[in-house]
Image (tube, rainbow, N blue to C red):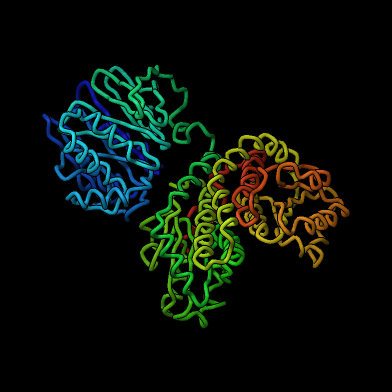
Amino acid sequence: MCGIFGCILKEGNAAPLIHSSLKRLEYRGYDSVGIATISDGKIFMKKDQGKIDEVHKILNLDDLPGNLGIGHTRWATHGAPLKVNSHPHTDCTGEIMVVHNGIVENFMELKAELQNLGHTFVSKTDTEVIPHLIEETLKNNPKLSFVSAIQESIKRLEGSYALAIISSRDPDKIICARNESPLVLGINGKGVFCASDIPAFLPITNKAVMINNGELVILTAQGYEIKKISDSTPITREPITIEWTAEMAVKQGYPHFMIKEIHEQPETLRNTLRMQDHYLDLLTTFLDRANEVFLVACGTSYHACLAASYMFSKLAFLPTYPVYASEFVEQHGKSVNIDSTILAVSQSGETADTLAAVTCAQQRAATILGLTNVIGSTLTRISRVYIGTQAGPEIGVAATKTFTSQLSVLAQLALKLSKKRGKISQDEMDCLEENLKKMPEDVETIVRTQEEKIKQIAHKYKDSKVFFYLGRGISTATAYEGRLKLMEIAYIPSIAFPAGESKHGPISLVENGFPVVFICPRDDSHKTLIGNIMEMKARGAHIISVIEEGDEEIKALSEEYIEVPKGIPSVLSPIPFVVPLQLLAYYTALEKGLDPDMPRNLAKSVTVK
Ligand code: AGP
């Protein structure tokens, strides 16, 4: 997730406004920043890696001439956060400048095609193919207008984009286009603006024009023109008035980042399905060759590792060992060796315990692989190979969208490894791949159809003294994660363990009215799980079940039930089944008058051991 901004002012320089607007988009990404403007038909640009304030101190981003310009604040997905990878990106002539938020899925083939045509690339980004594509289109069709050349070039892009493009070849325009990544216009008497998000221009205007997928926008000092990219059909759309405060706008109207990020999961899951095959294949190769594989992480990331151990085992017949990073050195510090492989999972890539475990393993010559949400983090620098979850910045202290993104990437790795090893049938592979692709839609359905019911459950059980979370098989990981969410933001003591363990001790805790959350995908453990539910019911527990839609058997045993869409394969079930538990924790915290974004005693990234 990155932030783009562009403006054409009737008078005055554009750069200071672009700079301040990018600051308001900093929550969308902050590892590098750049601005390009046009003055007297010439392009001027400044960009570098680093936070906006750091780069401004060195380069003075305000000091660029011209009343027209674009800017970008980056969250690296393709290419480390270095100056060479920061936006804007340009073509061979330096006459076309592009800023982009999104993922060009087919950039490798486009890049190869353009390189064969003599184009020179300097960055590792997907974005850089766009200005060169426009340059090549103009070269092959000299009679095409600049706008039409952009339109034709964009038709070749696959994936998501919000673009703002300027050129000395057509110096009075900004051309924008959108597919899936957000894009909105701002209008006032002093100029026109384009941005990833409303906060960018809200302090200067609350008149906004929303841009939809497949639309191209031409901004000039006179205003804006919208048309369909596919066939140039003109579109008329009046500005709307935004009633949000600036604070609300940064949360896109949500009261907290946590609920915004829970709702973002369909989009972030779509982004994880745009992984670069090259890196997935590389990681798969290392896992395939590994003598022993440890999955090392903390907290929520550990729960992703626990779920992944079932995925790797069931799909690829690969035994993996999930280990709490804080215990790794004690448990395996002496035995880890050159034949060991560590897959370290960390949203921040900076968790001290995880880095300590990785460093210990590295000193004993183990192979280090990394899965993180922050490209350029320490974990990416010490991993032999790493891959990003591409979930965008996660501001809420409680991990939500990054957890489901981790699960999606780990599932893709398990599937690739399974395919490589020929361990499951083509039909099963197709079914799993189909379901993974459908996951964003399933999560969107759960949020849309179950959120109200979950609010009521939170209200009913907000004063409970303890919660149980139980599951079997891979759902044990889901249970642990649901429990952590409730503990960390609603401060309710919660207990999670494999449902089969109840009778070995924990069931002695159950008293009348105890809320017990059961995670119940329709998998091999369904029948046995019903037995576990009966055990709890017999002792007066209130059963709150997360079930597959239409599971009448468990519905009949439950005081409350939350439904997820039918037919989700068990091995992928933690992704959708955790969403109701995230919402339950969030709404319980609200019921208790707590701030879900700032839970007591916790930090977003635990950089101390
Ligand atoms: C989860 O909601 C917490 N924020 C915490 O457990 C977190 O998952 C843990 O500290 C690991 O962080 P990391 O993924 O950045 O390494």
Which residue lies most toward the right here? 538
Which residue lies most toward the bottom here? 334
In-image side of 339 versus 62 (left or right)? right
In-image side of 47 versus 437 (left or right)? left
Residue at 65% in and 52% down: 482
**Mark count:** 0
Residue 483: where, in percent of width, then height? 66, 54
Would residue 90 be seen by someone viewing this image from the given angle?
Answer: yes
The part of the image, by quadrant, that contains residue 503 is: bottom right
| Vertical comparison of 445 with 507: above or below | above
Q: Nearer the viewer, residue 384 or 434?
A: 434
Residue at 38% in and 62% down: 380
The part of the image, by quadrant, that contains residue 127 is: top left
Residue 282: where, in percent of width, then height? 41, 65
| Vertical comparison of 603 with 234: above or below | below
In-image side of 96 versus 396 (left or right)? left
Residue 48: where, in percent of width, then height? 24, 49
Q: Nearer the viewer, residue 21 or 564?
A: 564
Q: Nearer the viewer, residue 224 or 588?
A: 224
Would residue 320 be seen by someone viewing this image from the given angle?
Answer: no
Residue at 81% in and 59% down: 509
Which residue lies most toward the front here? 426
